[in-house]
């Protein structure tokens, strides 16, 4: 594992001119391109520590950067910027800026668990990627993404509806949040079989947990507790 | 049955909602085979793949309460039919056994809720493993009244049925399925007389947690599963995962209009096929409640 430098020069871009004339002579070839150099600062070594100190992100330190997680990743097929290996690398270096630039990819894990399953070093990759994303959210470095919005809707629905979820409750809440859900055509196609089988009755009245109010109170208390992996 | 000792059944919210056909048919199939399990009546949501991302403690406490309820019933093993629940419960067990102080905190909250502390003694099993390890394909073959000879099926297991190995303990013993190339459901379906086609998408992802929030990607992923099944000549996609099942069924129209009408394919839960082959009717097994109408291919066996 190379020790990350505290500063790194990065090439921001090239200035290319069609015609460069110096002292009356016209330059050609590669002489007409100039690099703009920018120095990136702000590596934050505390990122690694903070993530390693969460229950989910604890295994981040085991990573060997082999890339097994990323080579089989479901999401990478659809988003070439999605790379658990890179997320881990950047988080360990503390390169928050690069992680911020990846914010449209960072949230897209579908939790298929191929990475966690295949990791030869025992990194719980799916958990670690979520821990990195949670770090970024917690510190306000990324905007709130649709995945997190949905996760929060889900938790709220569990809390409000007596500890259980029904597709109707979840679908309704998601529609309210502006996610694309089922079209009228789908709903018509769905209602036929559901009515015929009488299943619609079960869907309309989702059952509740007994004593949910008491459990809910304890849950709310527990949710304020900071937990560490020990 | 002695394989597992006393089995508690965790239905999960999916099986009480759109996954009702799964629960009903699971019960029928188990009864016919003489398998016993006790349902956890006062269960709560396991938090699925969502709650854990929002709050660590809520993500552990919700499943832990169910585990505690199962132990209060005197169970030795907890069976989930939904791989998502199976994963959540196993995850909690993993973190609780790994971190003793965390486990003590979870147990303290459980006591506040009025539940017993969880002693980490349960074995987590999925419904497919339950059938395979108790009666097995031989026991199933003996009960078949309506052989599904020549029915070409593609078994879809879903991502979380056997993954990751750290949580579900797969790949270490013969009682657990192979995490990359599962075959337990194949064997069960073969015992019914069905022909299991080669299927590369057995454990491919359906985009589950992002079905709403990243709909386009989910459609891509679901279309891939259907394409693999079609390419190998399957007539019906057999699932053991209510999340994947409901996602593919309810997105079928969108998939068909975007990726081609020929991708349309009926879906059924594996327990529905079991119960159907044991002689139960389409209404009894709720095969009529599946949105994609599996009776269109199954009616020739009536």
Image (cartoon, coloured by chain):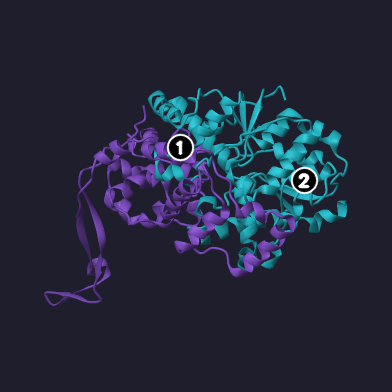
Chain colours: A purple, B cyan
**Residue B119, percent from left and from top:** 50, 22
Q: Is residue B155 left or right of residue A204?
A: right
**Residue B245, percent from left and from top:** 64, 51
**Residue B273, percent from left and from top:** 77, 46
According to the image, label 2 marks what residue? B273
**Residue B178, percent from left and from top:** 63, 34
Please tell me whether mark 1 sits on a helix, a strand or a loop: helix
Answer yes or no: do the residues labelled 1 and 2 have beta carbons within 8 Å?
Answer: no
Please, is residue B139 above or below residue A71 in the view? above
Q: Nearer the viewer, mark 1 or mark 2?
A: 1
Residue found 32% across the figure and 56% down from its top: A101
In what quadrant of the picture does the N terminus of chain A appear? top left
Please report, as a chain letter, where disc 2 is located: B
Q: 10 Å neighbourhood of mark 1: few (<14), some, or many (≥20)?
A: many
> Along the line of sight, which residue is nearer the eye, B104 or A204?
A204
Residue found 45% across the figure and 30% down from its top: B110
Disc assigned to residue A215: 1
Separation (CA) of disc 1 from disc 2: 38 Å
Can residue B23 be seen at all in this image of the molecule?
yes
Q: Residue furthest left?
A: A23
Q: Is residue B126 left or right of residue B218?
A: right
């Amino acid at each position: 594992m190379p020790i990350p430098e505290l500063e790194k020069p990065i090439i921001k871009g090239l200035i290319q001119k069609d015609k460069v004339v110096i002292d009356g002579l016209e330059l050609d070839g590669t002489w007409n391109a100039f690099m703009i150099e920018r120095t990136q600062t702000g590596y934050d070594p505390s990122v690694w520590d903070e993530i390693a100190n969460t229950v989910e992100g604890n295994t981040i330190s085991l990573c060997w950067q082999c890339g097994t997680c990323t080579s089989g990743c479901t999401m990478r097929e659809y988003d070439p910027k999605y790379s658990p290996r890179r997320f881990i690398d950047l988080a360990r270096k503390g390169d928050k800026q690069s992680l911020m630039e990846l914010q449209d990819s960072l949230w897209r894990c579908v939790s298929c668990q191929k990475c966690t399953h295949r990791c030869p070093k025992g990194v719980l990759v799916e958990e670690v990627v979520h821990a990195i994303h949670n770090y970024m959210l917690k510190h306000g470095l990324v905007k709130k993404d649709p995945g997190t919005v949905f996760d929060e809707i889900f938790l709220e629905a569990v809390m409000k509806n007596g500890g259980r979820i029904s597709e109707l409750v979840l679908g309704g809440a998601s529609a309210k949040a502006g996610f694309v859900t089922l079209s009228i055509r789908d709903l018509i196609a769905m209602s036929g079989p559901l009515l015929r089988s009488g299943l619609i009755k079960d869907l309309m009245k989702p059952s509740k947990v007994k004593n949910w109010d008491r459990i809910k109170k304890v849950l709310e208390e527990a949710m304020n507790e900071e937990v560490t992996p020990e | 049955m002695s394989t597992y000792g006393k089995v508690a059944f965790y239905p999960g919210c999916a099986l009480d909602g759109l996954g009702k056909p799964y629960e009903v048919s699971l019960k029928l199939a188990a009864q016919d085979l003489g398998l016993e399990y006790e349902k956890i009546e006062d269960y709560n949501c396991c938090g699925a793949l969502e709650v854990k991302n929002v709050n660590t403690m809520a993500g552990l406490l919700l499943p832990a309460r169910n585990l505690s309820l199962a132990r209060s019933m005197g169970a030795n093993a907890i069976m989930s039919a939904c791989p998502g629940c199976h994963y959540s419960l196993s995850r909690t067990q993993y973190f609780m056994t790994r971190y003793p102080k965390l486990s003590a905190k979870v147990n303290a909250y459980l006591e506040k809720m009025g539940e017993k502390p969880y002693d980490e003694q349960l074995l987590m099993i999925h419904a497919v493993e339950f059938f395979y390890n108790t009666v097995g394909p031989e026991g199933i073959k003996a009960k078949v009244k309506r052989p599904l000879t020549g029915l070409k099926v593609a078994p879809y297991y879903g991502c979380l049925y056997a993954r990751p190995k750290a949580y579900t303990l797969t790949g270490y013993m013969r009682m657990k399925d192979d995490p990359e190339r599962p075959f337990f459901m194949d064997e069960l379906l073969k015992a019914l007389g069905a022909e299991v086609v080669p299927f590369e998408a057995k454990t491919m992802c359906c985009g589950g947690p992002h079905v709403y929030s990243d709909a386009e990607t989910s459609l891509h992923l679901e279309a891939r599963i259907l394409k693999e099944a079609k390419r190998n000549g399957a007539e019906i996609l057999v699932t053991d995962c209510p999340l994947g099942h409901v996602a593919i069924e309810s997105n079928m129209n969108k998939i068909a209009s975007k990726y081609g009408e020929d991708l349309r394919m009926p879906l059924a839960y594996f327990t529905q096929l079991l119960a159907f082959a044991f002689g139960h009717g389409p209404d009894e097994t709720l095969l009529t409640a599946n949105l994609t109408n599996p009776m269109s291919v199954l009616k020739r066996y009536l």
